[in-house]
Amino acid sequence: MSSKQSDHERQLEAVMNAMAESVAQASDEDILAEAAQEGQDADAVAASVREMLLSACKACLQEKLRDARKKYERDVAALDAKEYSLPKTSAERRRLLASVFQRRPELVTVQWREFDSLTDDDIESSLKQMQELGILDDLERDEEK
């Protein structure tokens, strides 16, 4: 950054600080009178500023949510791209998942209560996740013992 730009930025910052200080020191009556003199509706300006600040706060608070969503989408894409050694047919995959739940009932959650109504994609996705977590490998090792 050149010294001219740096000087310019310092001057601009000084002007902005002086303006902010001027507004901060002005009385409410002076500010309302100036707004009326310029033909502005103080209530409308206040509502606009309030809405802008609330919107900025909401955007800031949702940044973590957006980041988590992006990470989730990357993780799902990675799961889809990875090769898994699952049974070839949907009936075999359904039997495997039923077997997992029979041997590991602690894995059964509310989402699995209607097991018969699960789609083939739901079952395949769940088996991929279980394989990723090592659950299927653990079951195979238990069978070998």
Image (spheres, grey):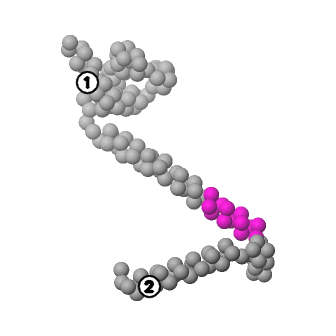
x and y, in percent, of residue 60 in the image: 52, 55
- Tell me the tag on residue 32: none
Q: Quadrant of residue 37?
A: bottom right
Q: Quadrant of the C terminus?
A: top left
Q: Which residue is mark 1?
A: 137
Label 1 vs 2, first from the N-terminus: 2
In the picture provided, is 38 more to the left or to the right than 22? right
Q: Helix or strand or loop: what does disc 1 sit on?
A: helix
Residue extending farthest top: 145
Q: Are marks 1 and 2 in contact (CB under 8 Å)?
A: no
Residue placed most toward the observer, 73 or 91: 73
- Work out whether 102 lies above or below 36: above
* Secondary structure state at the residue bearing disc 2: helix
Instruction: Name the spot of residue 111 as percent of width and height, x first.
Output: 48, 26
**Residue 132 place in picture, x, y as percent:** 30, 32
Which amino acid, by three-letter code, is at mark 1?
Asp
Q: Quadrant of residue 40?
A: bottom right
Residue placed under numbered mark 2 in the picture = 7
Segment colored magenta = 42-54
**Residue 132 appears in the rendering:** yes
Question: 90 or 7: which is nearer to us?
Answer: 7
Snapshot quadrant of residue 29: bottom right
Quadrant, the N terminus: bottom left
Q: Is residue 49 magenta?
A: yes
Main SS class of the magenta portion in the image: helix
Is residue 12 shown left or right of residue 4?
right
